[in-house]
Amino acid sequence: MHNSAKRGAELTRQLLTFSRKVQSERRPLDLNQEVEQVKNLLERTIPKMIEIELHLDKTPAIVSADPIQVEQALMNLAVNAMDAMSDGGKIIIETERATFDEEFCRTHLGARPGEYVLLTISDTGHGMNKEIREHVFEPFYTTKEVGKGTGLGLAMVYGIVKTHEGYILCYSELDSGTTFKIYLPALVQSGHWREAGEEDDQLKGGDETILLVDDEKYIRELGVELLTDVGYEVFTATDGEGALQLYRKEHQRIDLVILDLVIP
């Protein structure tokens, strides 16, 4: 019952993202830095037989974006690529600047003229045929076996891109891999690309001790990375019982507890 409720909550969140009902907290964000962080996370979680290769623009790729949602989109695309390479392969992530002119927009419904940052995620997997490609962003459409996927991963990516006034394209052929191209409006101020974290965007951090409780390994690893980077000491636990034992032992040192309210 607990797992069903948790799964239902996740499905609801994904549907809200697809329908663009989830509020974004945007700030100037360097996609190059975001891609580097996701790469470090992926290298600890995906099979060793899958290589991750980056080709990033030499100048900061600044957009106005919600970093959490951008990370969600990157992770979903990377997991989708991983599932297409059961025998190993390569994920290639690239950033570059791009421009949509009037001619491009006339032939691509929903595109708007302007300057963009292009984020490209490619894989060397088995690819998709035309029928699958035409339905790839539809909610609940999946080619995975029952219990292996909800069919909402790519729909969520689509919703995130649209929430950011962006544009997404998918290119794929059977046995030739898949490429997703995400265009996000470039953030240019006074003729230069603004660094993410400039002025008041930098996290202040501290030296307190935090207990992080979550049954998702990915969430724990991400939390530890983010919190330790700004100076905090972090203890982790995977369930309520383990958290209580750790708290009883270290309660004099623990200043704050962050927990998933629906963990066992």
Image: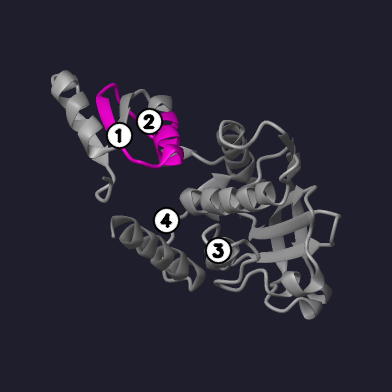
User: Is residue 206 depicted above or below 126 in this figure?
Assistant: above
Q: Which amino acid, by three-letter code, is at mark 1?
A: Leu
Q: Which amino acid, by three-letter code, is at mark 3?
A: Val
Going from N to C along the chain, the mark reached first, 3 or 1, is: 3
Going from N to C along the chain, the mark reached first, 2 or 4, is: 4
Whether residue 20 sits left or right of residue 209 in the image: it is right
Disc 2 residue crowd, few under 14, some 14–19, many 20+, Cα 10 Å? some
Furthest-front residue in this view? 146
**Pointers 2 and 1 in contact (C-beta within 8 Å):** yes
Q: Quadrant of residue 243?
A: top left
Q: CA distance from mark 3 to mark 1?
A: 32 Å
Query: Is residue 209 magenta-colored?
Result: yes
Going from N to C along the chain, the mark reached first, 2 or 1, is: 1
Going from N to C along the chain, the mark reached first, 4 or 1, is: 4
Give the label, 3 or 1, closer to the camera: 3
For the point 62% across and 36% down, the residue is: 39
Q: CA distance from mark 2 to mark 3?
A: 37 Å
Quickly name the residue at label 4: 25
Quickly name the residue at label 1: 212
**Kind of element beneath mark 3:** loop
Going from N to C along the chain, the mark reached first, 2 or 3, is: 3
For the point 35% across and 62% down, the residue is: 9
Quickly name the residue at label 2: 227
* Image quarter (top left, top right, bottom left or bottom right) of the N terminus: bottom left
